Amino acid sequence: MKFQLNYIFLCEQVIIDQSNKASFIGVFDKIFFTKLPGVHAKLYLVANFTLLDKNINDEFNISLLDDVKKEVPLNIPPVKVSFDRNDPKPKVGILLQAASINFSKQGQYKFIIYNDNKEVAYTEFTVGKSVKVD
């Protein structure tokens, strides 16, 4: 294993200040729509790994699958990371903004991060229909 996952989650907004500290706002694992299909305007996928092997491919691919493992189009290029090769336990972070994601149905969805075509991390979330309250 080349990676130790420190965390992975979805959130609505990320703010990075002048000292490079990040604030994550609206962490979630459920998305509700009044009707489906629906489009989610924007979300962030946030992940952090400790590298156990510094000889890695510096590109990560990300996919989104529905509950029957059908890929949901994201149209994003690979995410390239950099790290200090002199650090004995370097960490790499992935911060991906995904916009206008089309969800066709309710169910479980899964963001998966790959390196060298191997799954290294994932996070799951639920898409559902909101109940209209009168």
Image (tube, grey):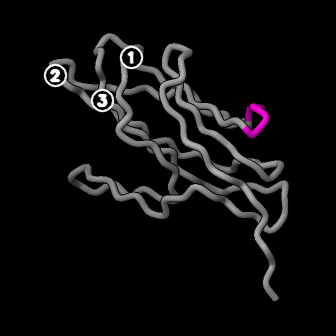
Q: In the image, which residues are magenta?
A: 66-71
| Residue type at numbered disc 3 | Thr
| Residue type at numbered disc 2 | Pro
Q: Quadrant location of residue 33?
A: bottom right
Question: Which residue sits at x=54%, y=23%?
Answer: 119
Above or below, comparing residue 93 to residue 26 in the picture: above
Determine whether the residue tagged by mark 3 lies in a helix, strand or loop.
strand
For the residues marked 3 and 1, what is the alpha-carbon distance in whole angstroms? 11 Å
For the residues marked 1 and 2, what is the alpha-carbon distance in whole angstroms? 16 Å
The main secondary structure of the magenta stretch is loop
Give the position of the C terminus as an image quadrant: bottom right
Residue 1's tag is 1
Residue 88's tag is 2
In magenta stretch: residue 49: no
Question: Which residue sits at x=38%, y=33%?
Answer: 5
Above or below, comparing residue 73 to residue 1 in the picture: below
Q: Position of residue 118 (x, y in %)?
A: 53, 17
| Residue type at numbered disc 1 | Met
**Disc 3 target residue:** 50
